[in-house]
Image (cartoon, grey):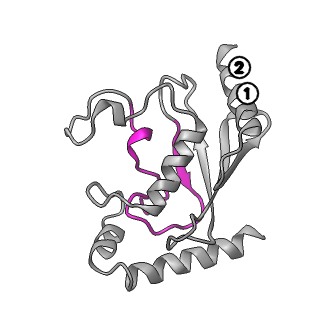
Amino acid sequence: KTELMTMSSLISELNKNPVEGFSAGLIDDEDIYQWEVVVIGPQDTLFEGGFFKATLTFPRDYPLRPPKMKFITEIWHPNVAKNGDVCISILHEPGEDKYGYEKPEERWLPIHTVETIMISVISMLADPNGDSPANVDAAKEWREDPTGVFKKKVARCVRRSQEMAFD
């Protein structure tokens, strides 16, 4: 019962205080754990003008554990795996990082909301973390040729996302 209240309060909170740069809602009104989000490519970035669809899948014990985020729209980015999985600190399980890369406070905390997740994702698009890439090829291109091959691949993703947005 309380998890239903938590999930529905997330939705009403988002409706009251929309955050610029994304929209979110349930994929199916019968399943409060599956959300669809659309991330709008941030201004003044290579992703500007893109409409990137993703899913947020919440665990049954949310907010104790983080949701998983996966882009459905193809996106070429160092912190997005080739299968679409988003790899950012606040979506990592709470506690100590066994590799010692992240501090516990950078990882998931129950105070995080859909807004804080989406703000982090929008920030990630604008400023990739090349130190711990989920897509090694994208990270290499981003580091070595950001205005060449990397930019071309991102531009193709943006174009495709615009075409798909109106399907």
x then y, percent, for residue 5: 71, 19
The magenta stretch spans residue 124? no
In the image, what residue occupies the spot 62% across and 69% down? 50
Q: Residue furthest top?
A: 1
Q: CA distance from mark 2 to mark 1?
A: 5 Å
Q: Is residue 162 above or below residue 1?
A: below
In the image, what residue occupies the spot 51% across and 26% down? 111
Type of residue at label 2? Met
> Mark 1 — residue?
8
Q: Is residue 156 above or below residue 85?
A: below
Q: Is residue 42 above or below residue 123?
A: below
Looking at the rendering, in which quadrant would you find the C terminus? Answer: bottom right
* Residue contact between numbered discs 2 and 1, judged by CB atoms under 8 Å: yes
Q: Which residues are magenta?
A: 67-93
Query: Which mark is drawn over residue 5?
Result: 2
Type of residue at label 1? Ser
| Front residue of this view, candidates 51 and 43 | 43
The magenta stretch spans residue 87? yes
The secondary element bearing badge 1 is classed as: helix
Q: Is residue 63 above or below residue 69?
A: above
Give the crowd class for mark 2: few <14, some 14-19, many >=20 residues within 10 Å: few
| Front residue of this view, candidates 119 and 39 | 119
x then y, percent, for residue 92: 39, 38
x then y, percent, for residue 112: 51, 32
